[in-house]
């Protein structure tokens, strides 16, 4: 099942200059200096279901972590470490030479899985401690993947995602730890902004791989919306005169952007569903405020998809040799289903000349469930 909600608040101006190619050069320099850095693949499906092309940026291979999130986490942690050491955009060797000081730094976050893995990995790489707290319902294999990635002590709580974020924020303040959270609220905006900027490397890689062909449509999955906001900002900055049409994609039962656009007063609103979805990475009930400022301007609408729509997309992508997890496939899932529905095609303004860009944000982060889904007829 798919439901579409138009954005009634489009047109409010927002400054995206921080997402320009020149402004984000230091971020790309950090990412490309990492020993594990490799461009992730861009796959083009030509003439797919009657559209000109679908470009799929495959983040299942990012840093060996099966997800894109570490791009934001490592930049944010690098930024904090640089400030703590009194350095300005230092090379990694200069940071690693200060091991005794790095050992005293501790980072903490809440995650549904991939963000926490990135924080654990980045903190471990720098020789810092980290703590990761996960909401109720998280499967143990996701928690263990975070432990295996780096330095983190990981705990699955009995709290929902939003309450878990509040809990970790309180722990950070009490213990004088550094909170690396990918959602923002009043008084906590700098780190989420740095995380979003970290995702720009993904966008500029994709643009280079596409030879700067302008997509007509971008379908971006959203939990709190940090990735979606960052990608929308980059494409708006690059194609200033004619930005692509952006649609946000969320699980049916955890659709905070849908609720925000439905109410349409320009403020953020929490999801009203039951919170049950296999798309664990998108199971976030409240939008990131700084991401909403961007998406309020550039998103044409938001779509909710049910788990069966995502499962269908996982199988289609598997046939294309793309390993896409439950959350990773969501943007493609909307395209895949909409192209089979004439009413959705019309509503999303899709035609034979359309060029769609989507991101496979994760691989098989729950291998057992992935295998069960893709092998199911």
Image (cartoon, helix red, strand yellow):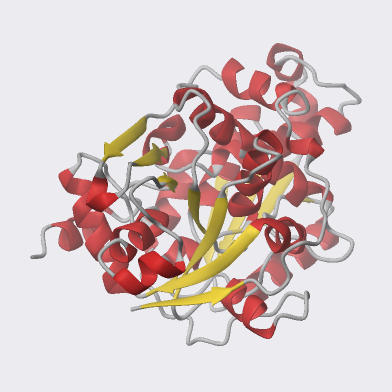
Closest to the observer, 333 or 181: 333
230 lies left or right of 246: right
Is residue 94 depicted above or below 105 in this figure?
above
The residue depicted at 51 percent of the width and 17 percent of the height is: 35
Is residue 175 depicted above or below 61 in this figure?
below
- The image position of residue 247, as x and y in percent, is 53, 60
331 lies left or right of 289: left
Closest to the observer, 167 or 373: 373
Q: How many numbered circles are shown?
A: 0
- The image position of residue 112, as x and y in percent, is 51, 62
Based on the displayed image, in which of its 4 quarters is residue 102 positioned? top right
- The image position of residue 127, as x and y in percent, is 65, 30
Is residue 29 depicted above or below 268 in this figure?
above
302 lies left or right of 176: left
Closest to the observer, 216 or 282: 216
The residue depicted at 49 percent of the width and 50 percent of the height is: 217
Q: Quadrant of the N terminus?
A: bottom left
Q: Quadrant of the C terminus?
A: bottom left
- Is residue 304 something that shows in the picture? yes
- The image position of residue 71, as x and y in percent, is 58, 36
The residue depicted at 76 percent of the width and 13 percent of the height is: 94
Closest to the observer, 86 or 218: 218
């Amino acid at each position: 099942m798919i439901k579409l909600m138009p954005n009634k608040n489009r047109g409010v101006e927002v400054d995206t200059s921080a997402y320009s190619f020149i402004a984000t050069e230091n971020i790309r320099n950090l990412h490309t200096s990492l020993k594990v850095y490799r461009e992730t693949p861009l796959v083009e499906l030509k003439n797919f279901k009657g559209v000109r092309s679908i470009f799929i940026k495959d983040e299942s291979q990012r840093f060996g972590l099966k997800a894109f999130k570490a791009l934001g986490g490592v930049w944010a942690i690098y930024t904090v470490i640089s400030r703590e050491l009194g350095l300005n955009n230092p090379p990694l060797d200069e940071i690693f030479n200060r091991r005794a000081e790095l050992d005293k730094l501790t980072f903490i976050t809440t995650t549904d899985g991939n963000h926490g893995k990135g924080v654990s990995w980045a903190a471990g790489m720098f020789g810092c401690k980290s703590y990761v707290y996960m909401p109720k319902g998280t499967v143990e294999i996701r928690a263990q993947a975070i432990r295996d990635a780096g330095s983190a002590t990981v705990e699955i709580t009995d709290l929902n995602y939003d309450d878990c974020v509040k809990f970790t924020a309180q722990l950070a303040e009490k213990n004088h730890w550094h909170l690396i959270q990918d959602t923002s609220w009043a008084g906590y905006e700098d780190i989420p902004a740095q995380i979003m900027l970290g995702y720009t490397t993904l966008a500029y890689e994709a643009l280079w791989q596409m030879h700067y062909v302008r997509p007509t449509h971008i379908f971006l999955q959203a939990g709190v919306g940090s990735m979606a906001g960052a990608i929308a900002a980059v494409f708006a900055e690059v194609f200033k005169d004619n930005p692509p049409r952006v649609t946000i994609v969320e699980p049916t039962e955890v659709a905070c952007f849908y609720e925000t656009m439905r109410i349409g007063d320009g403020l953020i609103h929490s999801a009203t569903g039951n919170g049950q979805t296999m798309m664990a990475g998108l199971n976030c009930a409240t939008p990131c405020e700084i991401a909403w400022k961007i998406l309020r301007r550039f998103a044409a609408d938001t779509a909710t998809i049910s788990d069966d729509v995502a499962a269908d997309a996982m199988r289609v992508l598997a046939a294309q040799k793309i390993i896409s997890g439950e959350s990773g496939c969501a943007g493609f899932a909307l395209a895949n289903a909409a192209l089979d529905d004439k009413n959705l095609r019309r509503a999303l303004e899709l035609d034979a000349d359309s060029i769609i860009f989507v991101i496979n944000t994760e691989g098989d982060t729950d291998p057992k469930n992935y295998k069960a889904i893709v092998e199911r007829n």
